[in-house]
Amino acid sequence: MTTVRLTTAQALVRFLANQYSERDGQEQRLIPGVWGIFGHGNVAGIGQALLQAAVTQEADLPYYLARNEQGMVHASVAYAKMRDRLATFACTASTGPGSTNMITGAALATTNRIPVLLLPSDMFATRAADPVLQQLEDTRGGDVTVNDAFRAVSKYFDRISRPEQLIPAALAAMRVLTDPVETGAVTLALPQDVQAEAYDWPVAFFRRRVWHVGRPVPEPAAVERAVRLLRKARKPLIVAGGGAVYSGAETQLRAFAQATGIPVADTHAGKGAVPWDHPCAVGGIGSTGSYAADELAKEADVVLGIGTRYSDFTTASHTVFGNPDVAFVNLNVARLDAVKHSAEPLVADARLGIEALARALKGWEVDPQYRERTRQLIGRTREIEDACFTVGHGPLPAQTEILGALNDVLGDRDVVINAAGSMPGDLQQLWRARDPKAYHVEYAYSCMGYEVAAGLGAKMADPSREVVVLVGDGSYLMMAQEIVTMVSEGLKVIVVLVQNHGFASIGALSESLGSQRFGTNYRFRNGGSGLLDGDVLPVDLAANASSLGADVLHATSVDEFRTAMEKAKAATRTTVVHVETDLYGPNPPGHGWWDVPVSQTSALETTRTAHETYAAHKQAQRHYL
């Protein structure tokens, strides 16, 4: 057997450079590069290996310098999302805090079912220098390290305590990264001494490998059972989730909806699978859903879920589907999701499943009255949206007015990115996406700080698209460092920084729950009340963005914002458009509910009143059995 002597880190770099994914005959690099921040633990291991690969050209695996470990995981996730989970990055970090900084990113990736490869550095496998700097000493066992925290948020975890263990571990890692059902964060913990340890590796380990991502075919009997339910439906509704996008089923879904007349509601991950102006598109569903989608959901007798995991926001905490006899048909590649809500499961690739349903339902369609009902509800929804866009609020504009202006100035292929705060709810109701990649809202983990880093990853995934990051001051303050990386890499991203001096989403939620917006405003402490309800803090986030290397434009009105956005689109460098909005809204009208428990007893009248409202909503909540 032919071998080559390399360190474990050098072997891993060479291995990763030769991994490819394939679907529908199209191959691409599975791991196109490595994000990293070096410190003790990886600087002489993975760092040396990446340097050697670049200098000698023995492996094509570019290195990208991030500014925050969590941020580089977010960038990788956004890249993978834009690539339909067929490519992602590896992320390397130093021992201790550098590595544990990636845990939130791992949780986000796994919750969203997006692949990312994490390479946290670990303590000495030999334990020759115990305890080393940043080592956790656990009295329960000598093999416990802080990296064990990755186990709960990884779809695959392994610690490479001997060089030869890398061979099965690396192959297992690629298997999980390319599995549309089991994918998520994959963690290979690398002790710092093992990274630098030499071994005679079989050359065959480094051969070019293509990981084929298949399309599971629907079982004919399952299709027959699903069609039997759908044919009986009088008020069916489709809920399109991320699986409809990742499988590239947009064309099939649009044609299926048009032929059958079944209205299509969407989740955050599924928005854009059917264009907003399609005659069957009724918008987002659930807690922050549109008027049309939530009204149809109340009446639906059969719900066809396509690639959705039915989060509590999608079901409005199990209240949006109001028909007591509602039945579910769930088309999903994952059986976990296919059987939810006592559904008739159709375990298959979304594209192939839709095609099978379309063939079996050929000639069947909903009653004309139901099509007309859908059309009328869409018309009312458009009126609500237009009112939000043109509310004429002042002196500071409402956030919905800014979103209206963005809808106007951005093109069909431009990507809008968001994750947390009040904007995801506003966007689900108001954003008019025509392209499945144009709406990039992370709402499985809804992680504050995702936005700017995600803009970086999305731009790298498709440089031909304009990428617009929508971020509030709360998320911006948590993680804006990757603006520096955008600048250093020469990438042009537009960051729309909406400053309202507080947490608008949680503030409104707090108020609705009787907690009086406590602790949600960015204010000086009031000497009289002792609360954070004094004057506004003199925080200049625009100056901060400028200090990070971005060009900055200012807007104080909707018209100024439109002008600034046109300038930003014409720019060639990363540009931040700073605009102040009213913390207190108004936001779009609510059509759904979200289960956030309220204190059952309280000395505050506001809390007691909120609990009465909460108890009333709970009456509509049920399991779908």
Image (cartoon, rainbow, N blue to C red):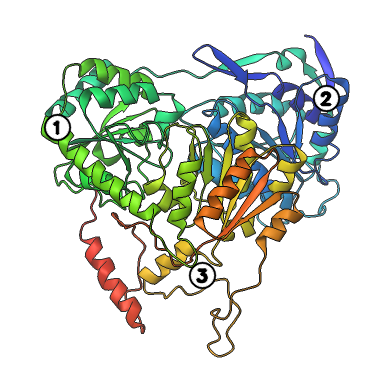
Q: Nearer the viewer, mark 1 or mark 3?
A: 3
Q: Is residue 186 visible to us here?
A: no
Say whether disc 3 or disc 2 marks the residue closer to the N-terminus.
2
* Crowd class of label 3 (few under 14; some 14 to 19; many from 20; radius 10 Å): some
Q: Secondary structure at mark 2?
A: helix
Q: Position of residue 465 (x, y in %)?
A: 58, 32
Q: Is residue 501 visible to us here?
A: yes
- For the C terminus, which image quadrant? top left
From the viewer's side, name the closer residue of 95 and 471: 471
Residue designated by label 1:
233
Count the numbered circles shown. 3
- The numbered mark at residue 53 is 2
- For the N terminus, which image quadrant? top right
The reply to whether discs 1 and 3 touch (Cβ–Cβ < 8 Å) is no
Q: Nearer the viewer, mark 2 or mark 1?
A: 1
Specify whether 551 is left or right of 248.
Answer: right
Q: Nearer the viewer, mark 3 or mark 2?
A: 3
User: Cα distance, mark 2 to mark 1?
Assistant: 60 Å
Which amino acid type is shown beneath numbered disc 1? Ala
Residue 121, quarter of picture: top right
Q: Position of residue 250 (x, y in %)?
A: 39, 25
Specify whether 578 is left or right of 199.
Answer: left
Residue designated by label 3:
520
Residue at the extreme bottom of the image, as rendered: 528
Q: Residue at x 46, y 47 (%)?
A: 443
Q: Residue at x 67, y 51 (%)?
A: 101
